[in-house]
Amino acid sequence: MAHFERAVHLDYFDPAKGKVKNPGMGNIGYVYSDHMRFGFTREEVSPSVPHTMTKLDRESFDKMVASSHCDNLYYRCEWRDIQKEKGKLFIPEEFKWMLEACEKYGKKWSFRIMSSSVSSVYKDSCPEFIKDKVKMIPYWRVIGVQEWYPKYFPEYSPEFLKYWDEMNHLLGEKYDKDPNLEFGDVSGYGFWGEAHHYCLRTPEQEKEYNWEPDNVEEVTEALLNSHMDAFPTTPVCMNLHYAEYPFGRKAIEDNTVWLRRDSFQPHMSTFEYLNIQEMKRGGCMIWETVKGQHQRTKPTVFTPEQFVQHGLDFGCNYFAIGFNPWDFNLMAHNYSNILETLDEKIGYRLRPAMIWRRENDDKSQDLAIQLINDGCGVVPGILTLKVKFPDGEEFAQKLPAGAPFKGDPTLYSFRIPEKYNTATEREKITLSMDITMRGKTYPVQWAVRQELLNPFEITVPLIDFVE
């Protein structure tokens, strides 16, 4: 038997055009990294040949951070860059610029500290003061200029973990509560902190393989726990390679951490694609990196436009633009169309497509809200949907992690206080949202095309039922 419902639509809202800036999403601009080389040829920018770092000029930095396309400032450095002596941090000049720029331009920031980097200008990435306690392990690479090798990564010993944990806690004590700090990467194991060592252990080997120590799971789990303990309120990001270990996969599936994929590769498998889709449902997906002078494979697999589109297809919350401010500025100059596409499609974009007032069988009334996500990514945390009635009384509802999902049919309902059962359009209600990402809560802007007096609030009239 058909069910007849007494209901009326209170309002409709269309998807926004252009950029809608919100927490937990956006384009990432690298303030600093181990790829600090300005140039246009493969030889100039290759990470695998001896080189010197190009000092960042303030003009290039200011141009990147002032860009409307740049949302999150990322600082990726080697351990030796951020700590010179036991028990004390060393804060580089560019790091200070970044913190000042966040305040000036309303940007967020994020970071990764690396214990080894193939791209380093040094033989290793560790501070000198640990080297009488921590053994350094040599490696070679097939690619690049062989006379620059061997380079070294640290042995993942209890001494190494102790020193690394100290560095994590020094950073956490100083920056964890900074509301502008949006996430930090779990790091410390593997090249670039990405949980792999594809290398030659002797120069006589012909093929690289992914070396790992016997205690790899114990070490990597200790690194995750150290980071999470040092940054109790800041979202944590983990490279997909950590998901190769049970604790890493569980952390991602439980929405304990966000997920990073370091780059697209021509050999990316269907298994990896399905793995990502399964794990990121309630978390956050970060992709890197596209460049204005994109190095194409032969035959061409990804153009820069396709490279970014594949990130959107996978469902990303963030996309990194290059590895330094010069990359970002060149990208903005030559491929503004790509950045505009990211602005409009990346992350989550929420709107109440339809709002109903309906009467239930017991004559009580409620609001039913069709909450739509027009973005390509998930909500990277817990969304709280709030309704305020004309007298200021407010009701709130926490959504499942990652919701609302694409194509989710769920209607979110709020009981209307009985005193408003006969209210008409002269009396209005206000809808708003907050997002909690681990221990930090921020208001969320509505992604609607209609003009709002306040981008964080939608006001609708309590239209009477149509008889």
Image (cartoon, helix red, strand yellow):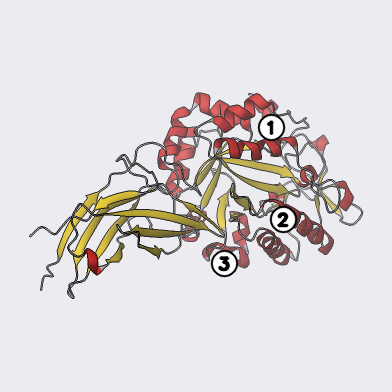
Pair 1/2: label in front: 2
Marks 1 and 2, how far apart in space?
Answer: 36 Å
Q: Which residue is mark 3?
A: 250
Marks 2 and 3, how far apart in space?
Answer: 27 Å
Location of residue 396 (image quadrant): bottom left
Give the amino acid at mark 2: Glu
Q: Which residue is mark 1?
A: 46
Q: Residue 22: in sight, yes or no?
A: yes
Q: Earlier in the sequence, mark 1 or mark 3?
A: 1
Q: Residue at x 63, y 58 (%)?
A: 242
Residue 107 drawn above or below residue 23: above
Q: Secondary structure at mark 2?
A: helix
Instruction: Say left or right for 215 vs 75.
Output: right
Quadrant (top left/top right/bottom left/bottom right) for the N terminus: bottom left
Crowd band around label 3 with a 10 angstrom C-alpha radius: few (<14), some (14–19), many (20+): some
Image mark for residue 173: 2
Residue at the far front in the pictured view: 391
